[in-house]
Image (cartoon, rainbow, N blue to C red):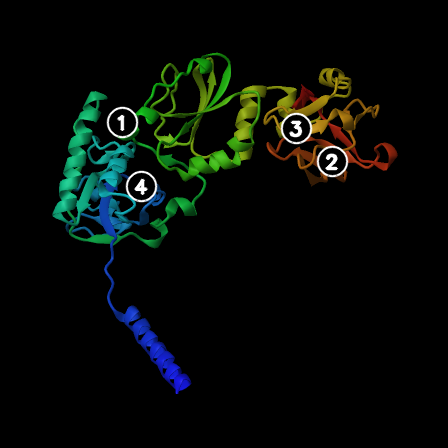
Amino acid sequence: MTISWLKTFYLSLLLAGSTLSLQAETMPATSHLDSVVVGAGCFWGVEKRFEAMPGVIDAVSGYADGNGVEPTYRAITQYRNKHNPDNHAEVVKISFNPAVISLDTLLKRYFEMHDPTQLNRQGNDIGTQYRSTILTNSQAQYDTAQQVLAAYQPLLTKAGFGKITTVIKPLRQFFPAENYHQDYIAKNPNGYCPDHSTGVRFASDSATKTAATDNSALLKGQHILVIDSENYCPYCEKFKADVASKYSGDIPLHFRYASNLDGLTVKTPTWATPTIILLQDGKEVFGRQGYLSPDEFYLLLGKFKLGNSEAFNVAFDEGTDGRFCKQYEIFKNTPDGTFVDKLSGAALFDTRDRFDSGTGWLSFTKPVDGAVIEKPDNRYGMRRTEIRAKVSGIHLGHVFNDGPNGKPRYCINATVLDFVPRS
């Protein structure tokens, strides 16, 4: 009897569980997420910056606040709509969890990431589609947006900026943009992030982001200056990962925000990030907006550091030092140490592996592990193996199979190396 009763009891639990499971799947649930629509210029960068914020569930590029204009990119970008007040704005719909990030915080970041005092434009993007706007879904959202705007205006005024032009109004309808606009920056990893921020911050983080920066060290000698973004910029992160993290050259590399360039003479516009500036005694001699690949960066650095020299020709035109050249004579009998890439500073060869081949070029039995790459070289009717630096990609020389005791002979040009004594 007991066993029979237990069987009946457990069977009833299983049936109840099935019923509960079905109810959980079919009963409507209450969503605790919220959303707001904002316009701050080109929606590509705005979307990416909000997506990177903790608490933001999704950010979708789209169009809103137009009247009589088709909500498509082709329509809103027609010249006749450039100054049309009824044109749609490029906007981003932000879905967020208020328990993680409040609307107040989102809107503070929104105002900080662009220049809300510019009317119908952000930098070089001009037209009503680029207007600054907040489109709300409730009276509570509208009130919060007005409060954040009112708190930001005195900070901008104190910093010398004009009146905020941001229009706050209820959202009528949001139209998602075409698929190729969604996650555009993630799909196009080589470029720059437009950064039109004023540099003015709300009190909570102004102490860390607007503090005066000492640029006195950049006023003497050669320096590499990278304009970084105060908001999330995937191109900046890509440059840091691909180039900056591997760079250890003797020309110092510095990161600055556009608002922290006091005392420097910079001619290139700094609204795009990253922007790479080459400085000589605090004055710009060359500037380039946008992401630079390692090859592009080191070619630029080579021109800056080496100029019109034999070393530049060897590094980038795959030239060859003259036999027994001056640099060879200096390097052939150095004390114990390491030969490094003249541009990146990466270790390439060790004196412990150096030997005198009698050829008039530096010779080694091996490179530092992982420091070089080998490529076939069939120029001039010869079949050789070229050696390049892994980090900078510059030409170093060739490797042959006639080294001592059956080892290879790495025949390396001295002019593209620097020497670091072993400590």
* Residue annotated with mark 4: 46
Residue 146 visible, this orientation: yes
Question: Relative to residue 368, is residue 393 drawn left or right?
Answer: left
> Of helix, strand and loop, which one carries label 2?
helix
State which tag comes first along the sequence, 1 or 4.
4
Q: Which of the labelled discs sits on residue 380, or is there none?
A: 2
Q: Residues within 10 Å of mark 3 (few under 14, many from 20)?
A: many
Q: In 3D space, how far apart are the residues under numbered discs 1 and 3 (Cα atoms)?
A: 42 Å
- Kind of residue at badge 3: Ala
Query: Is 237 rendered above or below residue 413?
Result: below
- Please state which of the two labelled residues, at mark 3 or mark 4, is closer to the viewer: 3
Residue farthest front in this picture: 2
Residue 228: % across, % down: 40, 30
* Residue annotated with mark 3: 347
Q: Are marks 1 and 4 in contact (CB under 8 Å)?
A: no
Instruction: Name the residue at 38% across, 79% down.
Output: 10
Query: Is 307 rendered above or below residue 405?
Result: above
* Residue annotated with mark 1: 200
- Please state which of the two labelled residues, at mark 2 or mark 1, is closer to the viewer: 1
State which tag comes first along the sequence, 1 or 3.
1
State which tag comes first along the sequence, 2 or 4.
4
- Please state which of the two labelled residues, at mark 2 or mark 4, is closer to the viewer: 4
Residue 327: % across, % down: 71, 17
Give whichever of 57, 347 is nearer the camera: 57
Q: Are marks 2 and 3 in contact (CB under 8 Å)?
A: no
